[in-house]
Image (cartoon, helix red, strand yellow):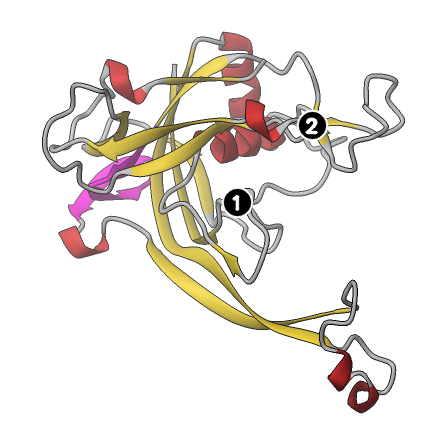
Amino acid sequence: MISLYLEAPFAVCRTFTAGWYRPTATFLTPSAVYGLLLNVAQIESRLREEDKRHEESVGATLMLPGLPRAEIAIGVPEVTIRSGRGCDPISEDSLFPRVQSIFQQLHNYPVGASGKDRAAACKGNKYNITPVRREYLSDIRAVVMLRGNPELEGRVLQGLAGQLNTARYGVPFLGDNSFLPDRLEQLAEPVPTRWFELVTPSAAGIQDRAVRLTISINRADLSKTTSALFATADTARIAPGDRAWVTVGS
């Protein structure tokens, strides 16, 4: 089992939606964290289109079968981290990331006659113009625990030490390749953490910060993408409870 600290100015964990409003989950998802760890461990997760196993009818990057299986727990530290150790407490209003929005203009050539009254004024440019709202997270701090696969754990630590840089594709990022982590390091000691735990049918009352987080993604058949409802624990704990652990990988 290994414990990691992750800090980033920005991140995004989008649901599979299209249109003018692109929301994000309010915290890092297990699927996003797993993808980040695979990149650090220099484990290719994409099934290339030239691979015989790739379905020709699917116009999307698919996940490679047989990715390493492990368990992940994710939480929010209640203290600042320096040199892998907990230090000063963080105020309640600064613990969790904030959801921010960017507003953009989306330009395209429409199907049909939509927006044709603007075509002449655009002089041949894309004349269907729609305002788009894109959400993202700011000021992310997270504790990630990984267990159940010693080989993967070892490769993650090797990657953090800079020993697996010969053939890595791309850079580690958090949902958007413009959003890079500032820090990703091994914790030297446990720290008090508000763990995200699965909400069970027997849960009573209002669950604070309840959010649906994606656990695995199936781009060939979105109905097979898995997610679950999580909420943060009422109090901080050093170790995650049983309901904080989720299985990722093939």
Mark 1 or 2 closer to N-term?
1
The N terminus - image quarter: top left
Q: Give the amino acid type for the residue marked by disc 2 in the picture.
A: Ala
Task: Tell whether 210 sits left or right of 105.
Answer: left
Numbered mark located on residue 220 in the image: 2
Q: Which residues are magenta?
A: 74-89
Q: Nearer the viewer, residue 111 or 80?
A: 111
Q: Is residue 52 above or below residue 10?
A: above
Please state the total of marks drawn on the protein image.
Answer: 2
Quadrant in the picture for residue 131:
bottom right
Q: Which residue is mark 1?
A: 174
Foreground tag (1 vs 2): 2
Quadrant in the picture for residue 55:
top right
For residue 148, say whether it is visible: yes
Q: Is residue 66 above or below residue 209?
A: above
Tag 2 secondary structure: loop
The C terminus - image quarter: top right
Q: Is residue 62 above or below residue 154?
A: below
Disc 1 to disc 2: CB gap under 8 Å? no
Q: Main secondary structure of the magenta part?
A: strand
Q: Is residue 114 above or below residue 166?
A: below
Q: Give the amino acid type for the residue marked by disc 1 in the picture.
A: Leu
